[in-house]
Amino acid sequence: MNRRDFLTAGVGLMAGGLVSRAGRAAPARRKPNVIILFADDQGYADLRCQGQVDDIKTPNIDRMAAEGVRFTDGYITAPQCSPSRAGLITGRYQQRFGLGHIPDCPLPAAETTLADRMKSAGYMTGMVGKWHLEPNVLSMDWARKHLKKVERTPKGRLRIPFDRLLPYYPQNRGFTEFFKGEWNRYWCNYGLDGKDRKPTGEWIEDKRFRVDVQTDAAVAFINRNHDKPFFLYVAYYAPHTPLGATEEYLARFPGDMPERRRYALAMIAGIDHGAGRIMDALKQHGIEEDTLIFYASDNGAPLKITKPDNPIDTDPGGWDGSLNEPMVGEKGMLSEGGIRVPFVAKWKGTLPEGKVYRKPVISLDFAATAVAVAGLDMPPELDGTNLLPYLTGKKHGAPHDALFWRFWNQTAIRKGKWKYLHVGGKGRYLFDLSTADQEHKNLIDRHPRLARKLHEELLAWANQLQKPGIPDGELNRQEKAWYAHYFQLES
């Protein structure tokens, strides 16, 4: 029985073994590994296999797509990092538990993570890189409830004692092994040499290029755990600002271009090199056909409207050099440029090779698919869909009837080819995403009944969330600037 037939027969058989016609128990098949590779602020255009730009070099992720599935309409649950990561790691719309934007952190302790679920199925679980789901310097509501004394920096940001952060760190959210950190300083319980460190965690410093360090940690985890089923979440801190790369990566991109673009290309090349090293490690250990890999970005690129090419060591949070073409808008917006991202899956021997999948999918599907391959019953609270039957041709139609978003003063629904976007008290848009016009032509006056129906569906979803409803008030300063530029709203 090949792996695809085996999955069709039921992933639950992996735990108990198969019974031959002669009545003898056949050896139980290994439960598949699951790896999620997650970029940070990488725009839709920036994989070569997307066919949008010709300056990018991503041969390894392109190979992943050629040997697996590239999704043209892959979405994230928010156009900002923390809520997007909360949706990914729980498999639930993050607004259901009140994490709508960064100040709403931390991820509530009561929420079950994908790591929790995989651990319960007997998996070794590992987390590498950017976490961003603990309390942060903007988490004022949490601080007022949980800190005896709220202390602030001269700039008005929170001071949070480390012992109050630790309960929200990966080791307390289902991850057995961890190498958490954005750059230079990492909280870990194993080293890059593969040896154990303090079981409860310790800080180490490594001032090398952060993407290479995070790849080293991912490969070390695989080397430590290749002989057992594992779930590995690798959250690269790139190409997010502050920009930085090695001369070796930068030298791959000579010529006249904005310097921020050069750095983005170099940082993405670093991620791509890491993806190649991870795939090589799987092959080396003979587990390539036992491993499902997903690749996506946490949101679209921040363009700052005009893509200002400010000096690399200035403008934190500025344009990171990545591009969203041909999508409209950028990080922070519920236009396609903010939420439609690079999206790839590979499982050698199980997923078809070179498939281009054009129906809408979302990062919530990672958890649902992982739970299915782990042999667990599908929890009813998950909002995602197991994608495997759709990708292997066992199921037809679309994985989702509709997808939903709510961020700041924006809400949106995607249903088939149609997208309805509701922007504060001013903007109502209806787009046909199957056309070349994408979000350049508002069709709401042509299809008012359809717009009303989509609005009703969007409202019904929004009323299920914490702080129910559709925001209908004044846009904030950033939203005003974005929508004045991209959609010609009055600022």
Image (tube, rainbow, N blue to C red):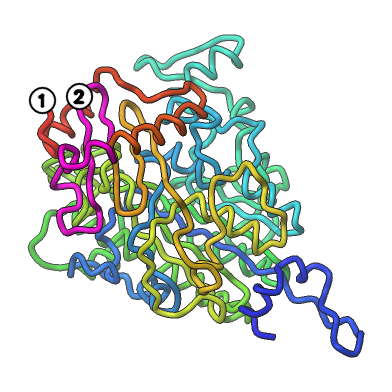
Residue 19, position as x, y percentages in the image = 85, 80
Magenta span of residues = 421-450
Mark 2 vs mark 1: which is more N-terminal?
Answer: 2
Q: Is residue 409 visible?
A: yes
Helix or strand or loop: what does disc 2 sit on? loop
Q: Residue at left 39%, top 38%?
A: 405
Residue 402 in the image: above or below residue 155: below
Depth check, front residue: 456 or 428? 456
Residue that label 1 marks: 490
Q: Residue at left 48%, top 67%?
A: 396
Residue that label 2 marks: 426
Helix or strand or loop: what does disc 1 sit on? loop
Residue 439, position as x, y percentages in the image = 19, 47
Q: Is residue 443 magenta?
A: yes
- What amino acid is at disc 2? Lys
Q: Is residue 2 magenta?
A: no
- What amino acid is at disc 1? Glu
| Image quarter hosting the C terminus | top left
| Image quarter hosting the N terminus | bottom right
Q: Residue furthest bottom?
A: 22
Q: Residue furthest top?
A: 149
Depth check, front residue: 283 or 180? 283
Q: Quadrant of residue 212?
A: bottom left
Residue 259, position as x, y percentages in the image = 15, 54
Q: Residue furthest front?
A: 449
Q: For the residue carrying disc 2, how many other residues have a C-alpha within 10 Å: few (<14), some (14-19), or many (20+)? A: few
Q: Residue at left 34%, top 17%?
A: 155
Relative horizontal placement of residue 442, taking residue 472 as reference (left or right)? left
Q: Quadrant of residue 275?
A: bottom left
